[in-house]
Image: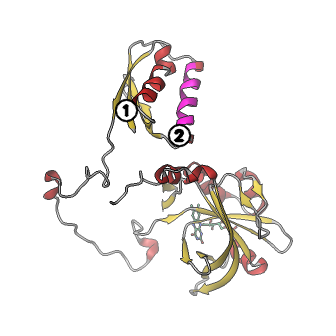
Amino acid sequence: VEFEIRLQRVRRDPFTEEAIRAHVDRLADLDDAGRLIAAGPRADGTGGVILARFADRAEAQRFADTEPFATGGWETVEVHEWQPADRANGYLDSSLPTRRDAPARRFVDLPGDERRWPRSPLPGQIVLVTTVDAGGEVNVAPESWVSMAAFDPPTVGFGCSTTHRTHRNVEDSGEFVVNVVPSSLAPRAWAMLGDHGVERVDHAGLTLLDATTVRPPRLAECSAHLECVHERTVEFGHGEVFIFGRITAASIDERALDEDVAVGYGRLDPCFFLHDRLHAGLAPPARTS
Ligand SMILES: Cc1cc2nc3c(=O)[nH]c(=O)nc-3n(C[C@H](O)[C@H](O)[C@H](O)COP(=O)(O)O)c2cc1C
């Protein structure tokens, strides 16, 4: 059940470091458990809000009553059951009166050259592809032109340039691993572009885990991994290729297997390339009945 915990500032003296740390730790714990929807202070300093899922009102009340900013006397707390508007519960139904008169969409033509598109109609999921070269040296590269391609055999593909190490390594070694980047790791994916090869692996501070069926490693900071054997490469001219691999093993963060599917996807936390240095996570999942 979703709850809004409303914090109201009643004392102006600054929070202690200890209270801030305890407050943030509790929010991080909620987030790790896939229960935090949003939280943050009001910009005018009058308090803040925590939107989160709890088993029931009693649990939400307990969380509110033990809020360090409240127990320390800086803020008062109020707990309200809250209903997020989404398409599943009909609150965003386009037949609602206020939406009924929404103007029809108008379409503008995009230029023929994709590089000049101001917005991509197909934002790609950000992954890190790990490979090894002929000498066994590990390489990692962010990619976002990535998609499942077939069930049987299970096949995944991604687009890259023939000038990239990733392409050379896949052609030489015949293997790669697609590592799913959670939102929290996206800034590191952008930062990687400043380095190449082993320096990139080192500077990114990634933890390499042995894969079970191929030589390129899995990345411990990623939320899922697809181990692949190179199947074929399709060339498009101008040095662009799409590389397909047969998935020989796959692993996923066990917390993504929460019995609530929506919570599980929140923990997988996939993120998407929108624009240079701009990414987005998953919007709250919505069920269509
Ligand atoms: C978030 C993100 C997504 C990217 N997606 C792709 C992609 O889909 N295809 C591609 O060729 N390059 C992509 N790049 C650029 C490559 O990662 C970059 O050229 C990298 O240096 C290639 O590394 P490599 O030479 O080690 O393979 C992306 C970069 C970032 C930061």
**Coloring scheme of the render?**
secondary structure
Closer to the camera in the image, 248 or 174 = 248
In the rendered view, would you say 112 is above or below 264?
below
Q: Earlier in the sequence, mark 1 or mark 2?
A: 1
Describe the element under mark 2 as helix, strand or loop. helix
Q: How far apart are labels 1 and 2 at the CA level?
A: 15 Å
Q: Which residue is mark 1?
A: 4
- Range shown magenta: 19-31
Q: Report the quarter where the C terminus lies.
A: bottom left
Q: Is residue 114 magenta?
A: no
Quadrant of the displayed image that contains ligand 1: bottom right
Neighbours of disc 1 within 10 Å: few (<14), some (14-19), many (20+):
many
Describe the element under mark 1 as helix, strand or loop. strand
Task: Identify residue type, mark 1.
Answer: Glu
Q: Report the quarter where the N terminus lies.
A: top left
Q: Which mark is residue 31?
A: 2
The residue at the point 14 percent across, 58 percent down is: 100
